[in-house]
């Protein structure tokens, strides 16, 4: 038997480290070639690490949430025949001693042979073994649930437990018992003492003094870092304008009613994307990346619009590339494709990077006004608020109009308030007179 | 005489009082205990201990007698035994004396001051003791009333002459030829059985329809059977009316309403015990009562601050071990510990022949409380050890909740089952389930195996029946 070492692969972004976000295996698991062993996260994409060989997992080199340097030992597999030959230094003290002899022999036999290191790009998802098996150790210590005691029933506890409770000033009727027949054990009392007495025993409302410690890892940590950077580095200016969407909504309804069967249903967003592309044509400095460390604004010709998307694991921003070159149907199709990919967790790194301006829209949850946070290092973000029928004074009478606000933020270091206002007014004009969107420049 | 001041004064040196005083002394509480007699109370002087001595002597006498009268299965032959009851009583007194001394030594070692004499409350904090050398005033921060109980006297049959209480029955120097026992409770049956074994012709007069009426008939049946074998007459539904004019017979009204004269050299009255609430100045206090008893709370506190009451004076069950546990608890409370009465069970034993042990709920009591139950019953006739002792009568019965198998009560009847009370008490107090008892290895061959088998039977997989 040999041993095969898998190191943290270089996932091809020129990065020095990646965060381990998920173990798909645990020590003792038998894995097949190509089975997913772990998931690591880089700047934006989550990369799965498949096993290059069949073998048994004997060592895991990191805990979930650890940031691991590229090239560091990650997993050791016991494999049939000869294993990989890298002299294995012990990165952690708790490596199982029982393995050492076997490992040393294996290493001696294989000295000098070429190493085999798994390097994989974004990988297909392999369902083996099930992620549910990769339960963190802490969760396995979960306590057995206490059996609730029917009202008026005496608590069951040994005399020693009763005495301890009495001396600690605890009414055992408040303590849940996990022992046989709901018996209160010394451990139950320990737990109760650790949590502190619940005060409001007469009432059904009970103070919950528990604190759960949730490690901020993976996507959540990325989001946290990005938001902190954006808000601390960019002086935001937020500009809110209301748009009369009545004409656009009529047009949208007509287009949807007569669309070809192979075309997606249009939402408001493709119209907004096209309006933005046209407004950017007139104000190209809003479609930019500001490298504030180098003091350079990279102004892009192509309009790559990031679409802030809520996924099960958190906020992601898939990108619709080259909106300037897509018609309304093309925008709708690509928008649907990339957002679905992000929601399904299948978006590639390419689909999650490279935006030059971003739209954030919560649809019916969009509220009246928002203060969007710029997707750093971009310089502008357009926020879509909720559309609703509102009475509008037309000079003679109130008429019902479909009104919608745009709440947009700009990097005030690069964009002046005047420029921001001009940009939004331009978009307003396009959206209120939607035919203009379709007129060639 | 110089006044005494103390933190704790205990009135009554019975099992409740002396345990309270010893424990308080251990905890460094400055304690004084008062009694008119030597330490030990009813239990040690005129109750549990002397009666067990007499019962043991009677059992030995009876056993030898059985060997003497006929060839027996063991093949033992013996001469017809004789007994010198005055020697038996002297032996019993010696045991009592040793225990008296033992308690006194324990009290002394715990630095408890003993004062002999009749105590009398002057107020809630002050007690005056009539000692041999004059009145002694004791002031105490806390007082524990542990005055106990005394035999109930029947108005038509005052104690004296041939009418005796249990106290005199334990001090007779000759075996009475004809003994009539009024009251078929445990005291009357224990003493009546002993004298029957010693050769008395015994009649038991019980007002209710059967003996030991607080127990179910399944438990009392072996006792009734043994009484019959011993030739004891049991008159149920009968009431004592008084002595005949000549004084050598007891007139009873039988179940049918007719009067009957029972020849009696001694009439033992054991119709119950009443709390001792007179003679110690209770009228100087303002205590809430619970019928004839002093009302107490879960800390054995009375309605007056700093005054506690323990033992028989606080009501049923009038058992020494209850009083001891109360006494221990009160001592710790006085010493500043946080304690309340939280016991799940108090075992009770009748030292009849055979013995009866109960703790917790009997099947009918459990059912009355609306609980669904499982009952396991294992007879000693299927127990090897009982067979080798020629004592196959009786059984162990376990009552448990049907839903979670928690033990609610345990009863047993059989020779020697009093010693099983330790296991029964532990099981109940620990909140054992049937599985706990069934899963505990019980040594073979012992009568205790019947306990495990009863639990197995309640679970539906008994092994030896």
Image (cartoon, coloured by chain):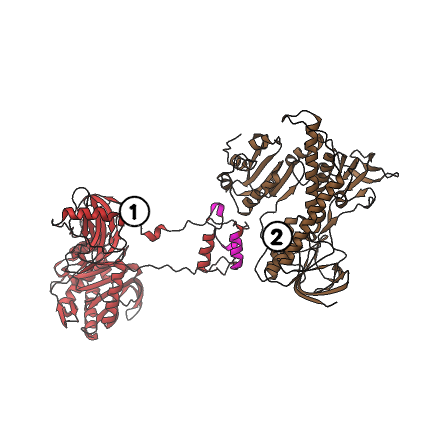
Chain colours: A red, B brown
Whether residue A358 can be seen here:
yes
Relative to residue B224, is residue A333 depicted above or below? below
Left or right, B364 with reference to A76 = right
Residue A162 on the magenta segment = yes
Q: Residue at x 50, y 34 (%)?
A: B460
Q: Residues within 10 Å of mark 1 (few under 14, many from 20)?
A: few
Q: Residue furthest right?
A: B245
Residue A403, image x, y percentages: 28, 64
Q: Chain of mark 2?
A: B
| One can see residue B299 in this view | no
Residue B4 - label: none
* Placement of B41 over or under B162, stated as above or below: below
Whether residue A440 is situated above or below residue B448 in the rendered picture: below
Majority secondary structure in the magenta region? helix
Between the residue at mark 2 and the residue at mark 1, the CA separation in whole angstroms equals 54 Å
Residue A324's x, y, as percent?
A: 13, 61
Left or right position of B456 against A298 = right
Q: Nearer the viewer, mark 2 or mark 1?
A: 2
Q: Are dots 2 and 1 on a single chain?
A: no
The quadrant of the image that shows the N terminus of chain A is: top left
Q: Chain of mark 1?
A: A
In what element is the residue under mark 1? helix
Q: Residues within 10 Å of mark 2 (few under 14, many from 20)?
A: some
Name the residue tied to disc 2: B325
Residue to which mark 1 is pinned: A133
Read off the magenta span. A160-182
Quarter the C terminus of chain A occupies: bottom left
């Amino acid at each position: 038997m040999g041993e095969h070492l898998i190191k943290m692969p270089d996932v091809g972004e020129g990065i020095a480290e990646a965060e381990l976000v998920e173990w798909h295996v645990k020590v003792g698991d038998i894995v097949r070639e190509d089975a997913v062993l772990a998931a690591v996260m880089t700047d934006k994409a989550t990369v799965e690490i498949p096993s290059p060989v069949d073998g048994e997992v004997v060592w895991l080199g990191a805990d979930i949430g650890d940031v691991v340097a590229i090239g560091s030992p990650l997993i050791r597999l016991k494999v049939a025949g000869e294993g990989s030959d890298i002299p294995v230094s012990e990165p952690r003290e708790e490596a199982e001693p029982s393995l050492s002899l076997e490992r040393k022999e294996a290493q001696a036999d294989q000295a000098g042979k070429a190493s085999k290191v798994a390097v994989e790009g974004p990988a297909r998802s392999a369902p083996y073994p099930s992620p549910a098996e990769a339960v963190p150790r802490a969760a396995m210590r979960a306590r057995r649930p206490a059996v609730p005691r029917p009202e008026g029933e005496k608590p069951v506890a040994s005399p020693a437990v009763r005495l301890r409770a009495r001396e600690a000033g605890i009414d055992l009727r408040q303590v849940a018992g996990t022992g046989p027949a709901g018996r209160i054990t010394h451990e139950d009392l320990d737990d109760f003492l650790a949590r502190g007495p619940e005060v409001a025993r007469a009432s059904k409302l009970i103070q919950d003094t528990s604190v759960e410690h949730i490690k901020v890892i993976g996507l959540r940590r990325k989001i946290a870092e990005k938001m902190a950077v954006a808000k601390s580095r960019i002086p935001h200016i937020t500009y809110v304008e209301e748009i009369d969407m009545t004409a656009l909504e009529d047009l949208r309804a007509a287009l949807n009613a007569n669309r070809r069967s192979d075309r997606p249903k249009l939402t408001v967003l493709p119209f907004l994307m096209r309006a933005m592309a046209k407004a950017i044509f007139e104000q190209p400095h809003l479609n930019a990346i500001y490298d504030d460390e180098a003091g350079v604004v990279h102004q892009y010709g192509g309009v790559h619009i990031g679409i802030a998307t809520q996924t099960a694991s958190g906020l992601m921003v898939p990108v619709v590339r080259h909106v300037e070159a897509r018609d309304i149907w093309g925008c709708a199709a690509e928008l649907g494709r990339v957002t679905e990919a992000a929601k399904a967790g299948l978006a590639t790194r390419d689909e999650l990077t490279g935006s030059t301006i971003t739209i954030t829209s919560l649809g019916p949850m969009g509220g009246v006004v928002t203060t969007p946070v710029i997707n750093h290092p971009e310089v502008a973000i357009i926020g879509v608020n909720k559309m609703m029928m509102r009475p509008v004074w037309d000079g003679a009478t109130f008429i019902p109009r479909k009104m919608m606000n745009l709440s947009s933020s700009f990097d005030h270091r690069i964009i002046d308030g005047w420029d921001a206002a001009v940009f939004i007014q331009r978009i307003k004009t396009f959206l209120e007179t939607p035919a203009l969107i379709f007129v060639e420049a | 005489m110089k006044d005494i001041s103390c933190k704790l004064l205990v009135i009554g040196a019975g099992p409740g009082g002396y345990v309270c005083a010893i424990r308080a002394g251990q905890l460094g509480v400055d304690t004084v205990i008062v009694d008119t007699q030597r330490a030990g109370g009813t239990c040690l002087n005129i109750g549990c201990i002397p009666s067990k001595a007499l019962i043991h002597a009677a059992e030995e006498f009876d056993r030898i007698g059985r060997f003497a009268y006929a060839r027996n299965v063991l093949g033992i032959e013996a001469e017809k035994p004789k007994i010198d009851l005055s020697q038996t009583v002297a032996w019993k007194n010696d045991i009592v004396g040793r225990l008296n001394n033992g308690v006194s030594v324990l009290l002394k070692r715990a630095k408890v001051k003993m004062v002999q004499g009749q105590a009398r409350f002057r107020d809630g904090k002050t007690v005056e003791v009539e000692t041999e050398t004059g009145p002694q005033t004791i002031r105490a921060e806390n007082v524990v009333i542990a005055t106990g109980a005394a035999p109930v006297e029947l108005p038509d049959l005052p104690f004296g002459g041939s009418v005796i209480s249990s106290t005199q029955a334990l001090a007779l120097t000759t075996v009475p030829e004809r003994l009539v026992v009024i009251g078929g409770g445990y005291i009357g049956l224990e003493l009546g059985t002993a004298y029957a074994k010693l050769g008395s012709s015994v009649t038991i007069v019980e007002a209710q329809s059967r003996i030991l009426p607080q127990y179910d008939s399944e438990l009392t049946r072996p006792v009734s059977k043994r009484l019959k074998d011993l030739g004891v007459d049991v008159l149920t539904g009968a009431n004592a009316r008084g002595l005949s004019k000549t004084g050598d017979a007891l007139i009873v009204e039988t179940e049918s309403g007719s009067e009957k004269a029972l020849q009696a050299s001694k009439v033992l009255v054991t119709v119950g015990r009443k709390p001792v609430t007179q003679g110690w100045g209770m009228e100087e206090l303002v205590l809430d009562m619970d019928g004839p008893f002093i009302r107490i709370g879960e800390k054995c506190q009375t309605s007056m601050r700093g005054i506690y009451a323990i033992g028989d004076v606080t009501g049923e069950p009038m058992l020494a071990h209850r009083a001891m546990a109360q006494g221990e608890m009160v001592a710790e409370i006085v010493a500043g510990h946080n304690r309340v009465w939280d016991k799940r069970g108090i075992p009770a034993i009748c030292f009849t022949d055979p013995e009866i042990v109960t703790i917790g709920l009997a099947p009918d009591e459990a059912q009355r409380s609306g609980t669904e139950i499982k009952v396991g019953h294992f007879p000693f006739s299927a127990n090897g050890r009982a067979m080798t002792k020629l004592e196959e009568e009786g059984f162990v019965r376990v009552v448990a909740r049907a839903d979670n198998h928690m033990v609610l009560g345990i009863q047993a009847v059989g020779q020697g089952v009093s010693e099983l009370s330790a296991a029964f008490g532990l099981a109940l107090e620990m909140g054992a389930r049937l599985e706990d008892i069934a899963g505990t290895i019980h040594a073979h061959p012992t009568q205790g195996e019947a306990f495990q088998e009863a639990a197995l039977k309640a679970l539906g997989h008994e092994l030896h029946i």
